[in-house]
Image (cartoon, rainbow, N blue to C red):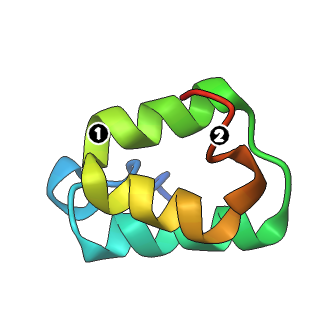
Amino acid sequence: MTPRKPAPGVARDKRISGEGLQRLERQLKAGNISKSVLEQWVRRYGDAAQKLIDKHRPADNNRGR
């Protein structure tokens, strides 16, 4: 059996794309994400990420981001 090379992480152009936002949506559907991680998503993806977060976590909208 030949040793398998580890695959690199997600490339930047894939992260900053619709695919990255799909990953965020899957994480939001899966459960609890810390506020600091959500802030990282918003810094990276801006308004598009904030809209997804607001859609999945409406109770957090008035808590200050």
Q: Is residue 14 above or below residue 65?
A: below
Residue at 42% across, 53% down? 50
Which residue is farthest right?
Answer: 31
Does residue 48 appear left or right of residue 21 in this picture? Answer: left
Which residue is farthest front?
Answer: 62
Separation (CA) of disc 1 from disc 2: 22 Å
| Residue 2 appears in view | no
The earlier-in-sequence mark between 1 and 2 is 1
Does dot 1 land on a helix, a strand or a loop? helix
The percent coordinates of residue 11 (x first, y second) are: 25, 52
| Residue nearest the viewer, comparing 6 with 40 | 40
Does dot 2 land on a helix, a strand or a loop? loop
Q: Is residue 35 above or below residue 23?
A: above
Question: Which three-letter amino acid code belongs to the residue tagged 2?
Answer: Asn
The residue indicated by pointer 2 is 62
Q: Residues within 10 Å of mark 1 (few under 14, many from 20)?
A: some
Q: Quadrant of residue 17?
A: bottom left
Residue at 14% across, 57% down? 13
Does residue 18 appear left or right of residue 35 in this picture? Answer: left
The percent coordinates of residue 37 (x first, y second) are: 59, 33
Q: Quadrant of residue 31?
A: bottom right
The residue indicated by pointer 1 is 44
Q: Quadrant of residue 36?
A: top right
